[in-house]
Image (spheres, rainbow, N blue to C red):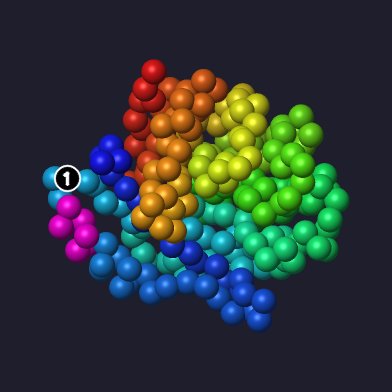
Amino acid sequence: ALGLSGITFTDHLDINYMRDGSDCYYDFGVYLEKLDAVRSAYKGRVDVFSGVEIGLQPHVAEDNRKMLAGYGFDCRIGSTHLIERLNPYDDEYQQYEPEQHHQVERYLQEVLKNIRLYDDYCIVGHFDYLIRYTDFPDNTVRYSDYSDVLDAIFKEMAERGLALEVNTRTYDKTPLDLESLKRFKAAGGETVTLGSDAHDVSRIAKGFKEAAELIKACGFDYIAHYEKLKPVYTRTEG
């Protein structure tokens, strides 16, 4: 019904994520075992791939490496959820840094720092994640307002061969500034992926058709997914 030929399931590896310092992750072995069963059940109808979303923080980079060693995921996403241990999800970060430009700039600087410290993944997840939880009259992260740090992020990504995720959940209320996609391409970025960050079956692939059209309009003729940590490209329609 959704028109998907395949789907990648991801869940979190967030070390030292909770306020009390505890972790948020799952049993990778059990997860991969269960996905094998799903893959077999849907063989010939939908391709099923395994993924993990790695919570990036400077002080847990080595712990992330150790936790993931030996597990054969198809896809690894690296995402910045915390800013110096402050969480925008529950307004903790916004209260600490209330001014809009400083709030976004500091978040993007954390994204940049995380990429430079640890890049053992395929995709940079929701680079503008913060705007899901901001409440300004205009929450859009415009390239023109943060060009220096965004240029640095896109340059590091291109040099490392990292893909840029267009995460449709982030744009439920706030539009993506297409100039960021164009600048990623101009910096040498070659790979763009789509994610819906569903967390619920009703959101699977939500907004994919519209997002794919925007991606193509920014000069990307292909959208990628990952199999055994390698990009597989599908031509964008239109």
Q: Which residue is mark 1?
A: 45
Query: Which residue is found at the position 34% from the left and 37% from the top?
Result: 232
Residues packed near mark 1 inside 10 Å, few (<14), some (14 to 19) or many (20 plus): few
Instruction: State whether residue 165 appears in this view.
Output: no
Q: Nearer the viewer, residue 172 or 219?
A: 172
**Residue 67 percent across, percent down from the top left:** 47, 70
Is 118 in the magenta?
A: no
List the single residue furthest toward the top: 238
Query: Which residue is found at the position 72% from the left and 32% from the top?
Result: 143
Q: Nearer the viewer, residue 59 or 235?
A: 235
**Residue 21 percent across, percent down from the top left:** 64, 79
If the image is split into quadrants, where does the C terminus sit? top left
What residue type is disc 1 on?
Arg
Q: Which residues are magenta?
A: 36-42
If the image is split into quadrants, where does the N terminus sit? top left
Secondary structure of the residue carrying numbered label 1: loop
Query: Which residue is found at the position 84% from the left and 56% from the top?
Result: 98
Placement of 20 over or under 34, stated as above or below? below
Placement of 36 over or under 121, stated as above or below? below
Q: Main secondary structure of the magenta part?
A: helix
**Residue 121 percent across, percent down from the top left:** 49, 52
**Residue 184 percent across, percent down from the top left:** 60, 31
Q: For this view, does 47 lie left or right of residue 119? A: left
Is 40 in the magenta?
A: yes
Query: Which residue is found at the position 48% from the left and 64% from the top?
Result: 12
Q: For this view, does 35 lie left or right of residue 134? A: left
